[in-house]
Amino acid sequence: MPQANVRRRLDELEVRRICVIKPSALGDVVQALPLLPVLRQRFPSARISWVINHELADLIEGHPHIDELLVFRRRGTARDYLHLLHELRQREFDLVFDLQGLMRSGVMAAATRAPLRIGLETSREGAGLACHESISGTGRNVAAFQRYWRVAEVFGSVGQSPQTIVPINAADHEWSSNQLAGLSGPVLAIHPGARWITKRWPVEKFAVVANKAMRQYGFSVVILGSKNEMPVALELQKLLQGFVPWKPVLNLTGQTTLKQLSAVLSAVDIVLTNDSGPMHLAAGLGTPVLGVFTCTSSVISGPPGPKHELVATSVSCAASYKKQCPHSGRKNLCCMDELSTERVCQALVRLIEKSQLRREVA
């Protein structure tokens, strides 16, 4: 079995330098973070490096179990990429994990020439050819968080609980506190955006659910997202200010660093979101999530545990993972209509009750 091969190779290897190759995306990086405490416990004296997309480097900079960040610029020049490959070769890594499993990460893994390179069964584009072993139980039918934790189990995490550490400093917590200071009652954070159009539940439906939270439970709302998501955030803000003009709505879209975003997500009471990176970041920080799933699977892509409420569409093409809707005409994006506000509002009530939030009727 591959795991036996991995353990045998490890017994024969002195591991002094480790490289984790996981440049993106935000949600995947967050779900891979629990591997780090396991590696640190298994190899307490080893130097651990992480290859990370420059846009996400801020998230894990200062992590107590990372000694070095090697920055990958996805839209950089060929010279940038060659420089990274040179750096990877110069580090003389003993153990490398390719958790990305794409051609570019496979090239990175191969460039290290490490004596033990480990990948996942989800590898494609020939990336697996650069690895000596692939961890079983890490295929596409396995929940994403379980794939990464399966790697941790092979390295001795059996019986341990996953630990997600996001290094948020005092200044970021203070910034978050100052921003949220004007909000009353429990706080609902909403991330209404997503990169794929097939993941974006309609903004007016987010507004309906938020309206219920504000009117019946006294929530204030903070809207989050990237600069590219500003149009949908402004539309949601306008709708909420029209629905419940006496309750504050704070729009921080495009105004946060990743650490500031983390601080906000750790401070709010509930996060309502599409399947996205901020969803996994909130869950990793321990904040209850109300997740909306249209073209992706809540089982495969959702955060684990009973603390969250995940609502998924049941149309025939649900969980197809298509970035563009396969239907045209009246059936185009039919998942958005099928996933009703009533179902999401019911999930909201369940989440409020099990989170034991104090009711403050507006």
Image: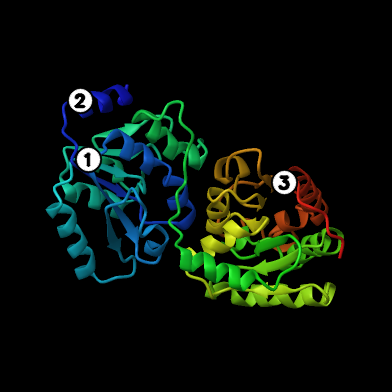
What label does residue 309 carry, if any? none
The image quarter containing residue 223 is bottom right
Please tell me whether mark 2 or mark 3 is closer to you in this view.
Answer: 3
Quadrant housing the C terminus: bottom right
Q: Secondary structure at mark 3?
A: helix
The image quarter containing residue 354 is top right
Q: Secondary structure at mark 1?
A: loop
Count the marks.
3
Instruction: Name the residue nearer the viewer: 55 or 340.
Output: 55
Q: CA distance from mark 2 to mark 3?
A: 45 Å
Label 2, on which residue? 11
Horizontal placement of 353 versus 146: left or right? Answer: right
Find residue 92 and report its horizontal and vertical position in percent: 13, 47
Find residue 61 and report its horizontal and vertical position in percent: 36, 60
Q: Mark 3 Cα within 10 Å, few/some/many (few <14, many 20+)?
A: some
Label 3, on which residue? 355
Q: Label 3 amino acid?
A: Ser
Marks 2 and 1: in contact by CB < 8 Å?
no
Label 1, on which residue? 45
Q: Looking at the image, is mark 1 or mark 2 earlier in the sequence?
A: 2
Find residue 278 and report its horizontal and vertical position in percent: 55, 58
